[in-house]
Amino acid sequence: MDRLGSFISRRRRFVLGAWIVLLVVSLPFFAMQTKHLTAGGFEVPGSQSTFVADSIKQFPGVESEKLVFVFNNKAQDKAALDAAITKAVDGTKGVDGVAVVDQNVQAARAASDQPIVLMALKVTGSADTTADAAAEIRKNAGILDGGDAAVPIHLVGQQALWAGMQDLSKKDLESAEFIGFPIVFIVLLLIFGSVAAALLPLSLGFVAVAVTGAVVFFLSQALQMSIFVTNIASMLGIGVAVDYSLFVLSRYREEIRRGASEDEARQTAMRTSGLAVAFSGVTVIIALAGLFLINSKTMHSMAIGAIVVVAIAILAAVTLLPALIKTLGHRAYEPGKVIGKVVAKLSRPPREGVDPFWTRWTNRLMDRPVLYATAATVLMLVIAIPALSLKWGTGATAQLPSNFETAQGIQLAAQAAGPGAGGPVQVVADFGDKRVDSAQVDQFAAAIQKLPGVAQDGVAKPVVSRDGHLVLLEVTSANPPESDQTFALVQTIRGAGGPSSALTGATVNVGGAAAQDHDFTDLISGSLWKVALFVMIFSYLVLLVLMRSVILPLKAVVMNLLSVGAAYGVLVVVFQYGWIDSLINFDHLGYVNSLTPPLILAIVFGLSMDYEVFLLSRIKERYNETGDNRAAVAGGLSDSAKTISSAAIIMVLVFLIFAAAGLPQVKEIGVGLAVAIFLDATVVRLILVPSTMELMGKWNWWLPKSLDRILPDVDFESSGPKAPPAEPTEPALAAR
């Protein structure tokens, strides 16, 4: 850090120029970052639903996905209907994976006396290709802008659902960023009392998000990247970049107040907070890397986006920020004339003879550590209790606002064709080397038709594959594809004692929208333990190297688990139980989206380590100076509490802004992260950590000699000399 800081000081203009060039080059691609993102990526390798989807192409005339235009012809205006149909057909031109069937077009035009007109497309692509095709058709046909048309056009089908979410996600992201940056700026202004200082963290947040958007654009050319990458990268990028720059800038201003020169203050900030930022950022990246243990393209792409934005935020905090601080000079630490006076009034110094708040708080904790540690732990466990009844779910329909055009199209299609017609259950029986036994298949179809939840005449005529070894049955549910009743039907068909007993020597695989949704849920829920184990082990190892202590990293891991558990508990209460629907004007889903728990786990573990590293590094710095555990904990907490609280306020605000503007899936992530960071920065960092460190005393810094010889000495230098080794106590001398 000394060498890096020295280089930046000497080559400040080069560093600034490099970042400016990078930003200017990135902006056009940042604006196009969603161009190649997909609404798909939910396949589960090795699952029955994936086997069925891969097998569909072997059946002549059968489509793996369905896309249907829905025309709201309530005025029964033939001319308007013809114009809408022409517009819809034109919207499919040049789109891969779909084709217009002339017979369907003619039938739609002839149905001008019907209030709801359906026109199916021929789908030739896979699920992901169909999702991308639906997104392109929606844009070409102006579906989002056609609500006031004489005959509004809708596009329905399972992949059209995800495409609708894609459009809604883009809109929500723009809204969140538009609202988020000004609010963060106001908070930073109150913290620093200077426009120049407040703009520094905000600038780093914008740079991190913009450059990440460009990287995502290029990555999406080679990798399948989910549309939700943009929400995660923006949400995390703004919060992390602002936090990291806040840590470094606060330390710089603190050193200035102590009388250091600008160069000395910048060097100290880099070798202390700068080093802490680098290590905590690496911990965040490692935690996010745990998401790769889930075999899901969607999860992988979201992990990539999050890792990229954190890496850029780290790089900006230790290179761009010092260069900007040097460029601004005294404006980076001197308060403004007007704003400075306001902030000074809000943060009056304590009266003479009265200790500052954080000193009084620390002394109170140290005097009764057992009481505070127990109370804080019980509180976190009580909040986490609802997580024991966590119900996983995946789906798009319930996440769409009722006034959104895709939701309206689904309702109209259900009225015209039945609620389950848009996503039939697809059953493929594999007879292996033998030919399909028609008699057995007929018995199998008859048994399925008798099952509860199957629509009248809901079992289509069996279709035999080209090689004669597979047979396909499409089953229309009497309920929507994403309903619990339809999935119960899937489970019944899959069950060993169900209709499949009519087939001897054949393997039954069940696919379709309902099956795929729940296969994806099972994949995520079944992989969460792997992510948790990975994150805990590697977070422990990073802190072991950083703190040179066996106990402190273990304590940090346990406390982070408390934060994650509390976040899960709140998610269940809000989104599964719906206890506060009336307060937030929200209709709960009845489950927690499958993507949310692993993302919360990885991100919270990473971000909690930010505060852990920053707090413990200040405590360790004090311990190196004094050798006194109590004084080190008290001093480290007093030094860092204000900065941690300020950083947490900003992070929580950013997450809540995204929660307020986003889809339920984004809302869950925003609410979960906001709750976890709030509790982590208050209950955990300001109560649990200091009280437990007081209880453990010198055991906090215990390190076996064997590890002491192996581990590198990552030291946080302080302005004062290290304390000499403590003199042995009398009992120790006697033992000698």
Image (cartoon, grey):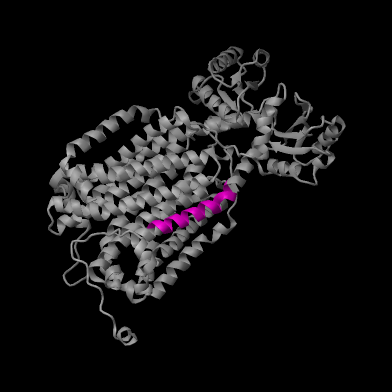
Is-magenta flag for residue 540? Answer: yes
Q: Residue furthest bottom?
A: 734
Image quarter for residue 617? bottom left
Location of residue 181 with respect to 279 vertically, above or below: above
Identify the residue at horizontal 44%, vertical 30% (top origin): 34
At horizontal 83% and vertical 38% (from top left) the residue drawn is 503
Which residue is more in the foreground, 163 or 303?
A: 303
Front residue of 445 and 105: 445
Q: In this rendering, is residue 472 above or below 543? A: above
Residue 420 horizontal side relative to residue 230, left or right: right
Position in image of residue 388 (x %, y %): 57, 59
Residue 63 among those drawn in magenta: no
Residue positioned 59% across, 13% down in the render: 82
Q: Which residues are magenta?
A: 524-542
Q: Is residue 540 visible?
A: yes
Q: Split into 4 quadrants, where in the image is the C terminus?
A: bottom left
Residue 585 visible at all? no
> 167 or 513, which is in the foreground?
513
Residue 176 place in picture, x, y as percent: 39, 39
The quadrant in which residue 518 appears is top right
**124 vs 444: above or below:** above
Residue 505 screen position, x and y as percent? 82, 38
Dominant secondary structure, magenta: helix
